[in-house]
Amino acid sequence: MSFVSNLLLASVRMAVPLLLIALGELYSERAGMVNIGLEGLAAIGSLVGFLTCFISGSTWVGILCGALVGIAVNMIYAFATVTLCANHTVYGMAINILAPALASFIYRIFFGSGSDLSQITLMKTINIPILKDIPIIGPLLFSQTPMVYLAFLLVILTGFFFTKTQAGLNYRAVGENPKAAATLGINVIRTKYLACVICGALSGIGGAYLTTCYSNTYTEGNISGRGFIALAAVIFGRWSGGGILAACLFFGFCDALQIRLQVASVGIPYQFFQMIPYVATVIALTVIGSGKSGPKAAGKPYRKEER
Amino acid sequence: MSELLRIENISKRFGSFYANKNINLTVEEGEIHTLLGENGAGKSTLMNILVGLYQPTDGKIFLKGEEVHLHSPNDAVSKGIGMVHQHFMLVDAMTVFENIILGDTNAKEIVIDREKRRAQIQELAQRYGFRIDLDKYITEISVGEQQRVEILKALYRGAQLLILDEPTAALTDIEVEGLYDVMHKLVEEGKSIIFISHKMREVMHVSDRITILRAGEAVATVKKDEVSAQELAAMMIGRDLAASSFEKVISGGSAVAELDHVSYNRNSKHYGLNDISMKIRSGEIVGIAGVDGNGQTQLAQVLTGVIAPEEGTISLGDSKILVYDPNNFILRRTAHVPEDRNLQGLVGDMSIADNLVLRRVETDKFSSLGGAFLKKGAILSYAKEMVEKYDIRSRSASQTVRSLSGGNQQKVILAREMEAEPDLLVVAHPTRGLDIGATRFIRQQMIDARDRGVGILLISADFDEVLELSDRILVLFEGQIMGEFPGENPPVDEISLAMTGR
Amino acid sequence: MDNSRKNLVNIFVPVLSILLSILIGMIIMAFLKANPVTAVKYLVIGAFGTKQNLGTTLTRATPLIFTALCACFAYRCGVFNLGGEGQFIMGSIAACFVSLKFGLTGIPAVIVALVCGTVAGGLWGAIPGVLKITRGQNEMIISIMFNYIATLLMGVVYTNWLREGSVPQTAQVPKESQLARIVPGIRVTWGFVIAIVIGLLIYYFLFWTSLGFKFRAVGLNQTASRFNGYPVRRYMLSAFIISGAVAGLGGAGELMGTQFRLINGFASGYGFDGVAMALIGQLNPIATMFVALFFAALRTGSTTMQAATGVPTSVSDIIQALVIVFTVAGMALTQLPEFSTFIGRFFGRKEAQAV
C-alpha cells in the first residue's frame, strides 16, 4: 500500500514541473507560437532559481527570479520570431543552445569548477487541514508544496480563461487566424509578445521548481528532456488545460515509477528504467497519431502588411 | 444625401511599386458605391487602408467632413467602418457566436455574458432577416451563411460604412439574390456600402455610382444611369477589347481519360465526388462549371493521381489505373496545372530553370551517367529557350520563381506541363488572379494544345472562362454532375440553374 | 532576389554574426577583468599556434563535422532530425562492440567497425523517420527522445555490458585497431579526412545529381514534389537514414580515432551543436564544415586561454551560442520586406537600370 501511495505522491511531484512548462507552451501555441526552446528556458530558470535562492535563502525569491530570467531569455525568441519573422523551430533550437550555455557559464562564474555541490533548503510542504486526512487523496493533493497547489490552480484558471472570457477568446483567435483577429482590432503582435512572457515565465518557474522544490541542488543537464516531454504533453493533452494535466500526470507517473523500479530491482541496469519516460513519450505520441492538430496558425510567421 | 466618406490623394507604395496612386473618392450616405477594376488594379489595397490594416504612404481620409487617421483596425471599427473580406476573416475552430463577439471592445465584462449578447445578436439578425444558428461551427455552415456571419459581425460593431470585397465570387445565383436584398435593406436604413467587383453584370445591377480603378489610379467616377457596360469595360481595361471568341469543336477523337462511377468522400457536399462518370476525348476542352467547393478540387486530384477514388475506376487511354500515384499518371502522359500554383505547382525557392526541369531532371537531356551528373549548362539553355517561348518575364532564368508575378509563375507551370507533351491536361483555375495579358496568353496556349490533339479538363470558378473555352460543359454540384451542355451556343440560363443544384 | 546578392547575404550574415559574437565575448572577458585582446590572442594561439594545437583543433572538429553534416543533409531534405547525437552514439556503441568483441584487429576491425557504426546510426535514424511518415509524428520530439534513450543505452554499455574495471567505462580499443594518424606525432587521424570526403560527397550529391536535386525539392516544398510525382515519403525516410548514417559513421570514427572508449559524457552536446553549425552554414555542406572548424578552434583555443588568462572556457560556449542566435535572426531580418526597401534605397539606381 505504501509503495503505491508513495508512487502516486511522487508522480504528482514529478508532474508539476512538466505541467508548468507545458502550460507555458500552451499559452505560446494558442497565440500561434510553437516554442521548442522550452528545454533551454527551463535550464536557465533552474540555475537562476537555484542561485538566487542560494544567495537570498528564500525559495520564493528563487521561483520569482527563475520566472524573470525565463521571460528575459524568451524575449529574444519573441523578438526574432514575432518581429523578425524568423522560423520558430530554428529559433527555438537557438534558445536551446544559448540558454544552457548561459546557465553553465553563470554557474562556473559563481561556484568555480569544483565538484562539491552547494545545497539549499527546499520549499516546505503546506498541509491543508482536514482535507489532508482524506485517505489516499489527502496526502496526494493536500499535503504538498505551495507550487503544486499553484500549478493545479493554474490549470483551472487556464481552462476558464480560454473558454469563458472575452480576452481568452481573442487570444485564441490570434493562434487560429491572426489576420482575422487583426481585422477585428485584436493586437496580434502584443498578444504574441504576451504569450512569450507567459511561456518564458512558466518555463522558468518549471525549471526553478526542480532546484527549489524537488532536488536541493543544481546539476548541469538537470532538465534532462523535460522541455521536450512537455512539448509532447501539449500534443498528447490536445491543447486543453485538463488534457495537459492528464498527460503530465502520466509522464510524471512514468518518471516516479522508474525511480522506484531502479531502487526495487536488482540485476537489471538502472539505465533501462531511466528510459521509461522517454519511451513512454514516444509511445504516447505514436498511439494518438496526428489526427487533430493544434491551433491553425501555430508556427507560421505573421506579417502585418503582406502582399 | 450627405457625404459620409471622402478620400483625398491616397497613395500606397510597396517598395518601388505603387499599389495606389493619388486616389480620390467620395461615398454618400445611403449609397452603394462600386469600385470596379481588374485584379491588381489596387482595389484591395485601398480597402485595407480604409480598414486600418495598411497605412497610406500619402493622402487624407475624411469621415463626415472630419479628417481621421486609421492607424489600426480598431480605429476603423470605432469610426463605423466594417469590411467583409473576399477571403472571409472567420476562425474555423470557433462557433458563429464566438466569431461575432470576437474582439468586441464594447463589452466591459471579463466573463462573456452569453445570454445578453446572444439576445443582441438575435435582434440584429431579425432586423435584417438573417437566419443563422449561432452555435454551429464555421466549418459546418455554407459559404453564403459564412458571408452573412461576416456582415452580422460588422453590423454588431455598429458599422455605418460596409465594404464588400468581391462578395459574389463564391455564391450561387440564389445566394447572390439574397445578398442584393440584404444590401438594399442596409442602404434603406441609411448605411453606405462600398461594393468591389469586376463583374459587369452585377455592377450594373446594384450600384448607384461607380469608380473605376486601373493600375492603382482612379480613372473616373460615374453614375450608373449615365454609362453603359461597354464603356465601363473600356475604362477598366484602358483600351477597347475585341470580344475574343474561340472556335468550338466537336471532337471525334478517342477518349484520353474516362471516369467510371467514381466516388470519393461521398458524404461531403463540398469536398467529395459522388458517382461521377465522364469522358475526355483527345482534341477537346471539357469545362467544369460550378461554384467553387463542389468537388472540383477532388475531381482534379483523382484525375492526376493525387488522391485515389474510393469507388469506381479511372482509365487513361486504353488502360485502367490500378495504382493511384501522381507519378503513375505522369508516366501515362497526364499533365496538371494545379489550383494553388505556389503550394502545389512550384518549388518557390528554386529557380525558373529548376522548376522547368522538375520532372525530367534525370533524363539524358539534363543529366549524364543516369542522373549522377547534372548538365547545368543544358538545363539553363533549355530554360532560356522556354522563357522565350512562353514569354516568361524575368531578369534571368536562375531567378527564383517566388520572385515572379503570378502570371509568370503560371507560365512556368504551363511551360513545364505543355513541354511534357501530354495526352491529358488537367487545368484548375488557370487564370485566377492574373492580369488580362497573361490570361489571354494562357487561354491561347490551351486552345493551341487542344488543336494539337490534347484532351483538356478545365476547372474554373470563372463562369465566363468556362463558357469561352469549353467545347463541352459539365456542371458539378455537391460532388455530382448535374448535366452536360454543348460549348457552342451554351444555354447560359440552364447552366446557371444547374449550378444551383436543379 | 538575385542569386548573386542572395549568395552575398548568405556569407555576409554569418560572418558578421561571428564577429559580433566574438566582440560580445570580449566584452564579457573584460568584465571578468581579463584583457580581451590578450585573451583572444591566446585563443588563437591555442587553436592554431603550434602543429600540436592545430592537430587538436582538427581532431575536435572531426565529430562536429559529422553531426553538422547529419543535420545539414536532413534539413536540406525537409526533415528536422534533431537526433544526431543519438545516432552518433549508436554508431560508437556498434563500433565499440565490433572492436572489443568480434575478435578482429587491424584494418579489418577498423573497416567493419566503421561500417557497423554507419549502419547502426542509419537504423537509429530510421525509427523517427518511420514514425513520421507512417504516423505523421513530430520528428523533432521523437528524435530527441531517442537521443536520451541512446545516451542511457550507452550508459548500460559502459557500466555493464562492456565495463572494464572499477571505473564505469569500457575497455580501450586495441592499439592496432585504432584509426591511424595522418602525420606521425600529430593527433589528427584519417577520421578527419573521411569527414571532409563525406562533406564533399554530400555537397556533390545535393547539388550535382538528379536525385539530390529531387531531395532538395522535397525539402523546399513537399506538396509540389508530390504533385510532380516524387515519392516524397520514401525520400524523407531516406533522408533520415542517410543523415543518421553520417552521424553513426562519425560516432564510430570518434571511438576508433580519438576517444577509444565509451565513458560518461561521450558525445554530450554534439547533436545540438551540429544543428547550430548546419544552420550557421546556411545548410551548405562546405560552409557547414568551415563552421565546425571554427567551433572546434574556439573549444581548443579556450583551454589555452583559460590557462593563460583565467577566462573560463565556457565563454567560448557563449560565443558559439550567440553566433547561432545572431545568424538566424540576421537571416530572418534580410528576408523582411522592409529590409529590401531599405537596401533598395542604396541600390535603387542600379535596380532601375536592370529592369
Image (cartoon, coloured by chain):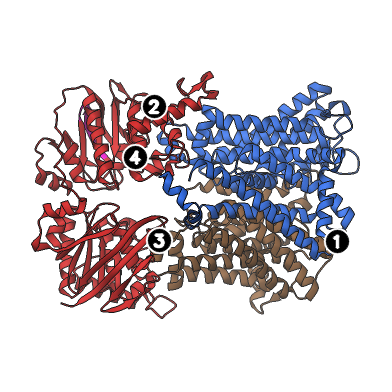
**Amino acid type, callout 4:** Gln
- Is C1 drawn above or below residue B184 in the view shown? above
Q: Secondary structure at mark 3?
A: helix
Image coordinates of residue B54 in percent, x first then y, are 38, 64
Image coordinates of residue B300 in percent, x first then y, are 30, 37
Image coordinates of residue B444 in percent, x first then y, are 23, 34
Give, as a single range, the part of the protein colored magenta: B274-284
Disc 4 and disc 3 in contact, CB within 8 angstroms: no
Between B12 and C80, which is closer to the camera in this rendering?
B12
Subunit ID for the residue under disc 1: A
**Amino acid type, callout 2:** Asn
Spatial CA distance of label 1 from label 2 is 65 Å
Point out the frontmost of discs 1 and 4.
Answer: 4
Q: Residue at x 23, y 48 (%)?
A: B291
Q: Quadrant of the N terminus of chain B?
A: bottom left
Q: Residue at x 81, y 57 (%)?
A: C37
Residue at image mark 1 = A112
Q: Are marks 1 and 4 on the same chain?
A: no
Between B161 and C132, which is closer to the camera in this rendering?
B161
Spatial CA distance of label 1 from label 4 is 63 Å
Q: Earlier in the sequence, mark 1 or mark 3?
A: 1
**Colour representing chain A:** brown
Residue at image mark 2 = B328
Image disc number at residue B410? 4
Q: Residues within 10 Å of mark 3 (few under 14, many from 20)?
A: many
Between A240 and A50, which is closer to the camera in this rendering?
A50
**Amino acid type, callout 1:** Gly
Left or right side of C291 for B346? left
**Amino acid type, callout 3:** Lys
